[in-house]
Amino acid sequence: MQDIKTNHTSSQNLNPAEHEQVLAHSVNQSDTLAQALAHADRGATGAQHAPSSQHAATSGWSPEQEQAAEVGREAAAPIVVATNEHALDAAQMAAVMTAQAGGSKPLQEAAAVAAAAAAAGNSGIAVNVTTPEAGLNSNASEQSVAAVADAVDASIEKLDLEEPQRSLLSLTWPIFIDISLHFATLIINTIMVGMVSVKAVAELTIGNQVFDLALIIFNFFNIGVCVVCAQALGANNKRLARRLIHVGLGINIIMGTLVSLGIFFCSGLIVEVMRVPPEIAESSHNYLKILALCFLPEAICLVCAAILRAHNCTRDAMYVTLVINLITICGNTLFLFGYLGVPVLGVEGVAVSTVIGRTVACFIFVPLIIARTKTRIIPRFMFIFSRKVLRSILSIGLPGAGENLSWQSQYMFMTGVVAAMGAIPLATHGIYMQVVMVLMIFSASIGMGTELLVAHYTGAMKLDLANRQLIRSVKIGEVATILLTFSMPLGTGAVLISLFTDDAGVMALASTLFIITVFQEPGRILNVIIINSLRATGDTKFPVIMAVISMWGISVPLGCFLGIYMEWGLMGVWIGFAADEWVRGIAMVLRWRSKAWQKAARRVYEQTLAQERNRAQLKTAAQASAA
């Protein structure tokens, strides 16, 4: 709890010019706000205790006091949940006391916001309203009055500049390692199975593609859970955050169960439809059937990781992913090579180790969720769904999934175009994509870290701080990306390619792509950071619409024209990719500068407040009927 200290005198002793002078209001870490309100209760300049606004008229206040109380309540409404009557009462009292001391409406609003922030328990907020024009007289010029108003506005804006509890770096590096470890799982499986035979690698292909598709299905919902939960925590709405935890777990249990059962019973059909060669059909079928058992625990792991990220606990998800990889490596070693007397199971053993790793991770994640979020998981609440909560989640998740699907479809289409160019271009395309994946993971991690911070700030309606965070993230991302990409043509790229192959034809083709990467990746990280930030504010439709237009209207046509018609080959295809990244990046910059995201953030905030008001009204009505 914090307190608000108010210096005031009787309003009749102030001249008109002094009414515009400063009232210093500070919010410090203590619990003396109640004492200040009690002092006001005992009759400081005739004020009585500030009740809720609906009862103000019957509390004996004068019309002027009622007007000041309403100013205070309206000023505080954007920064506190509507049902937090204690904070709103504090705001009303602060505004009344400021009005009685001769403070103007802006000063009443400043005091009200400070008192509400203190009563709501927001730490680290300090408001000190001062003016350099303390000597104003009744004949003050318009410029002097404007200077006073600007000083007041600047002081009020300090409320929006609370320092974040976690920095971008502290959030980003665990996300980067976490995503890298997820990709490493498939690479580890492929490398270890490749030690057995090339045929065994082919047996993994169908199962891995199905696994990737399942991840997209799960993530479209979990992206929404993460963003909406972060917005709720930013608004200090812990009740909604707890509700989202239960809804997220419930929906993922349902989706994971349906996907697992569907793939388990349809694995034979999937292998047949994918036209798997007869010599590996049976083992591919067995691998997919066993792998289907991991989709339920995988769905639970993904939503738990999203919830932890929303609570700024990104390291926990990283550590659990590391445990999953260690279990996978140990399991693969035992089942592929038969150490310690374990029977050799081939690719079926790889599937078994994957299932064991995900299942163990579930038993680690759930206690972590309880400990980090201070939420008691009640199973029956996981399957009680609110249409408004689901709508909020899907309004974020579905556009995000649409953008990812558009990118995947574009990449698969252009891979088919490259395949028509020959084996060497196709091999170079696949290998180079693995190299670029490192840069893509870096972009995604900075984008996700920025998304979490922006979601917290917009949830608390700290829009200035959200804007500053985005600008800071873009600067950091651009500088780091430029340094990384410029090293590619200077030798780093050749070293990375040599890890996959020493073919001279692949090396020659890749060397031209290194130059394109220098121009492509700065556009990509600009694109990724701003899209994630727009999604965090609730502005989700524009990025997906722009993705479809740019990818299928620019990237694909330009890549086909340059690669096939102009006979530039693989270089033309990647020029198309680079053009898409920059077109979307510039479009996202213009979208952010248009401040449409601020309207979206306010709309989301007002919807949340409306839900809280409806809940409070229903609760009040239920209590009244019971009485």
Image (spheres, helix red, strand yellow):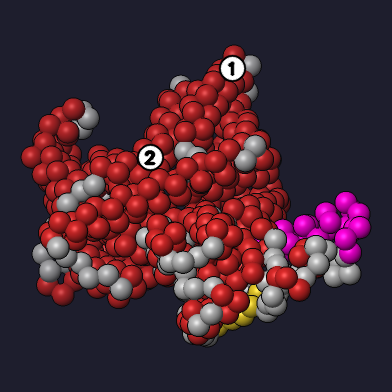
Q: Which residues are magenta?
A: 137-157
Residue 458 position within the rendered picture, expressed as x and y whole percent measured from the top left: 52, 54
Q: Secondary structure at mark 2?
A: helix
Q: Nearer the viewer, residue 304 or 413?
A: 304
Per the image, is 458 magenta? Answer: no
- Residue marked by disc 2: 395
- Look at the image and tell me whether residue 162 can be seen: no
Using a 10 Å C-alpha cutoff, classify the residue at mark 2 as few (fewer than 14 neighbours), some (14 to 19) or many (20 or more). some
Of marks 1 and 2, the one in the foreground = 2
Q: Nearer the viewer, residue 240 or 406?
A: 240
Q: Are marks 1 and 2 in contact (CB under 8 Å)?
A: no
Magenta span main SS: helix
Residue 196 position within the rendered picture, expressed as x and y whole percent measured from the top left: 26, 55
Residue 561 numbered mark, or none: 1
Per the image, is 151 magenta? Answer: yes
Q: Residue sitting at 66 percent across and 40 percent down?
A: 593
Using a 10 Å C-alpha cutoff, classify the residue at mark 1 as few (fewer than 14 neighbours), some (14 to 19) or many (20 or more). some
Q: Check disc 2 and give the amino acid type.
A: Ser
Q: Check disc 1 and give the amino acid type.
A: Phe
Q: Nearer the viewer, residue 110 or 387?
A: 110
Q: Secondary structure at mark 1?
A: helix
The quadrant holding residue 102 is bottom right
